[in-house]
Image (cartoon, rainbow, N blue to C red):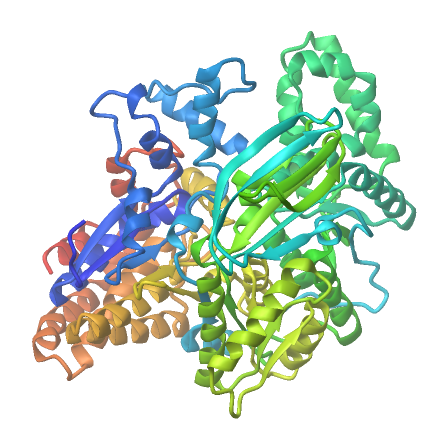
């Protein structure tokens, strides 16, 4: 990558965002070329990441550069300007599906090891581990997060509010959490007085020491925490809440984040599966062992393994599973028409998307009958479960929010340099026996330790001092820029938060807080305070850690805007570059399914539009490129017009889809550039373009619509054929001719 201030990196990712790129990026290229801006792409898709780690298994033509590693270096440079689209945070089933597809395409990749037999298996597993879960974000997010709603988006949401579900004071909905034995209750935390290398050890009851992680370098002032979840307490909690849900006729729903917490949460999910179906797992334990059944992979994987059995035996076990539903609590469903329950796959229900929907839908989820029912939302860890309960209690008492009048909750999130990294994958372990897991410093002293039992889940995470200091500064600056109160969501009764409170109080002294309202509040109290302000139409800044950042920036936008994909997500990088994220991608698989079946892509690229707007502004200022500023300002006007004139994608086939919205973006962007008077050259250039797009509007929309209603073939899901994708996503010869000749 050349050091070029007028360069924007546009990431190639997966699923619907990747398909949309084939349509949008040619338009963006054509416009930004007029400002001397070079748009480059980097492949951080799941398939691309897999291939980059297995060059020694591939032909020379099949080998792929490790673009994620290249971007990891770029984000540490001041000239970095990256637009990051949603990518797959792969669960094990998704990774296996990607491997299988690549193998079928002739890539001689090794299978994902089901068990470790030799050093080759160990090596292969370590490589695949690098692409599981949140492999991308910790590398790119070398800065803290600034998420807020764009003024044009907020104005549109107020003009066209989406009605939320009606709450009843008789609602039985609740969040059920562990009372002890969870990560919250067992957490320990230390702030390093000086830099040191520590290691994580397991000490068995026989005194034998196993090093789990060696030479973990910690900086002076760095906060490290460790905790564990008692599996015994977890299983007891699950059984107790199952009985209560059955007694009170509540849907039983599980809310975890197995895509990101790729070590800990699949294990917890497996316990939900094996406890719910405990009689089945007990009765057929020997058969399940021979089949290699792993409850962590869910009921869907179990059904697949049953196909290997003789028909009579398979049907007997399937009947036993079906009978379980008759005497257990009713399960929330992912797809009631297909019989897919909340327990089929760990990545089907993801907490940051699922819990906002529970609040939006009046405390309800979908049951097997295809109807909404009050739900018991199972969130084991008290670190964040209690404030979800507070949101339910507030709505039950005060009624649903009104998007036309509710205030906005922006977020400043601590995440730079892998701060509070999701799941701390390389520092999460399943205890293989009873004993002690401890963190030991270079002097051999134990600085944190926990007594664990076999199967318990132990994990550690870190937050460096520089990101914390920057996080405090960013929170204060947002309060100054907006005049809104900034609330640090920190609980003095949680070990990690207690350490952060000391630092926040210290670093706040570096800033002039005159006229500002800066508070430190425990999450439940912060939620109460924020919800009350939101109901009154007042705006609030939440200043939180990494996981809260993710959960809150889905909860409030889904209520306020209908989706978190409409939020501006800016990461001011510590090295002074910029990372501009484009919103959530949780519904992308369904979008791809509809596109392949009906030729209609309902993915809304609004997040891409918004990210490009602030990317152009950032580049224009830092590289002193006035044309980039003109482009950014005109793009913002085009986005507002798309919203006002309802040119966003429809959910229905034979109506405007993603490609149609891109056409209108091009036309409105050209019109805005033609109307401005800051750059005469661009004005003259785009007057012609705008006129041609308007004159040929009917022909273009006709060409875009007439390809819908038919199945589309792109030859792959994880690695589709680029030529077929381009053909499918650029079906208007008229539009292509105009864009390609700009």
Residue 120 coordinates in the image, percent (x, y): 44, 16
Residue 411 coordinates in the image, percent (x, y): 52, 69
The single residue placed furthest to the right in the displayed view is: 247
Q: Nearer the viewer, residue 549 or 197?
A: 197
Asked whether residue 540 is in view, the answer is yes
Figure check: 112 above or below 240: above
Residue 637 coordinates in the image, percent (x, y): 31, 76
Residue 619 appears in which quarter of the rendering?
bottom left
Figure check: 21 above or below 230: below
The single residue placed furthest to the top in the displayed view is: 310
The residue lying at 62 percent from left, 79 percent from top is 519
Figure check: 438 above or below 395: above
Question: In which quadrant of the rendered image does the C terminus lie?
Answer: bottom left
Q: Nearer the viewer, residue 168 or 534?
A: 534
Residue 167 coordinates in the image, percent (x, y): 76, 67
The residue lying at 41 percent from left, 68 percent from top is 646
Asked whether residue 269 is in view, the answer is no
Figure check: 184 above or below 6: above
Instruction: Please give left or right for residue 357 compared with residue 105 in the image.
Output: right
Instruction: Please give left or right for residue 151 compared with residue 639 in the image.
Output: right
The residue lying at 44 percent from left, 64 percent from top is 466
């Amino acid at each position: 990558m050349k050091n070029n201030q007028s360069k924007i990196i546009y990431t190639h990712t997966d699923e619907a965002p990747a398909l949309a790129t084939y349509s949008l990026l040619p338009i963006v290229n054509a416009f930004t070329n007029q400002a001397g801006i070079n748009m480059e792409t980097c492949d951080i898709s799941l398939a691309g990441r897999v291939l980059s780690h297995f060059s020694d298994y591939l032909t020379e033509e099949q080998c792929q550069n490790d673009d994620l590693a290249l971007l990891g270096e770029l984000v540490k440079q001041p000239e970095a300007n990256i637009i990051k689209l949603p990518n797959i945070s792969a669960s094990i089933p998704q990774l296996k599906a990607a491997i299988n597809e690549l193998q079928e395409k002739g890539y001689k990749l090794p299978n994902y090891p089901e068990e470790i037999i030799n050093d080759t298996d160990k090596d292969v597993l370590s490589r695949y581990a690098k692409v599981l879960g949140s492999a991308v974000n910790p590398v790119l997010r070398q800065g803290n997060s600034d998420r807020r709603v764009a003024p044009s988006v907020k104005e549109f949401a107020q003009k066209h509010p989406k009605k939320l579900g009606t709450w009843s004071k008789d609602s039985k909905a609740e969040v059920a959490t562990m009372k002890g034995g969870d990560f919250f209750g067992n957490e320990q935390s230390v702030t390093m007085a000086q830099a040191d290398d520590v290691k994580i050890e397991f000490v068995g009851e026989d005194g034998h020491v196993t090093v789990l992680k060696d030479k973990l370098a910690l900086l002076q002032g760095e906060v490290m925490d460790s905790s564990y979840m008692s599996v015994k307490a977890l299983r007891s909690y699950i059984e107790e809440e199952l009985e209560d849900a059955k007694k009170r006729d509540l849907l039983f729903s599980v809310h975890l984040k197995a895509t990101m917490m790729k070590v800990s949460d699949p294990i917890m999910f497996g316990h939900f599966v094996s406890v719910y179906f405990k009689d089945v797992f007990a009765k057929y334990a020997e058969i399940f062992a021979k089949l290699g059944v792993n409850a962590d992979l869910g009921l869907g994987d179990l059904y697949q393994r049953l196909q290997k059995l003789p028909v009579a035996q398979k049907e007997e076990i399937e009947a036993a599973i079906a009978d379980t539903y008759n005497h257990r609590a009713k399960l929330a469903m992912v797809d009631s028409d297909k019989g897919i329950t909340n327990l089929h796959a760990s990545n089907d229900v993801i907490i940051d998307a699922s819990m906002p929907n529970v609040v939006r839908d009046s405390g309800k989820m979908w049951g097997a009958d295809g109807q909404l029912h009050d739900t018991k939302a199972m969130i084991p860890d008290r670190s964040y479960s209690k404030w979800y309960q507070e949101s339910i209690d507030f709505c039950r008492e005060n009624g649903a929010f009104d998007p036309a009048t509710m205030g906005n909750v922006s977020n400043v999130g601590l995440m730079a340099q892998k701060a509070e990294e999701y799941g701390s994958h390389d520092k999460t372990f399943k205890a293989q026996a009873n004993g002690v897991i401890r963190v030991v410093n270079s002097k051999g002293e134990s600085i944190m330790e926990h007594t664990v039992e076999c199967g318990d889940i132990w994990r550690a995470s870190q937050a460096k001092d520089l990101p914390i200091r920057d996080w405090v500064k960013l929170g204060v600056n947002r309060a100054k820029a907006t005049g809104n109160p900034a609330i640090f969501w920190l609980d003095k009764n949680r070990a990690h938060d207690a350490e952060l409170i000391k630092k926040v109080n210290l670093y706040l002294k570096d800033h002039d807080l005159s006229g500002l309202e800066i508070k430190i509040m425990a999450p439940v109290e912060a939620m109460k305070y924020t919800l009350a302000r939101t109901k009154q139409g007042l705006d609030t800044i939440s200043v939180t850690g990494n996981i809260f950042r993710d959960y809150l920036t889905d909860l409030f936008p889904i209520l306020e805007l209908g989706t978190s994909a409409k939020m501006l997500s800016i990461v001011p990088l510590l090295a002074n570059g910029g990372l501009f994220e484009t919103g959530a991608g949780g519904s992308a698989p369904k979008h791809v399914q509809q596109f392949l079946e009906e030729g209609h892509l309902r993915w809304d690229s609004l997040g891409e539009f918004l990210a490009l707007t602030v990317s152009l502004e950032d580049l224009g200022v830092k590289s002193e490129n006035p044309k980039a500023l003109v482009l950014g300002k005109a793009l913002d006007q085009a986005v507002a017009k798309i919203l006002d004139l309802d040119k966003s994608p429809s959910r229905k086939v034979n109506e405007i889809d993603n490609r149609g919205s891109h056409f209108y973006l091009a036309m409105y962007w050209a019109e805005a550039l033609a109307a401005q008077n800051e750059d005469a050259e661009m004005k003259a250039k785009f007057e012609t373009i705008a006129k041609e797009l308007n004159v040929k509007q009917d022909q273009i929309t006709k060409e875009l619509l007439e390809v819908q209603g038919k199945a589309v073939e792109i030859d792959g899901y994880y690695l589709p054929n680029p030529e077929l994708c381009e053909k499918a996503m650029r079906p208007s010869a008229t539009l292509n001719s105009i864009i390609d000749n700009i």
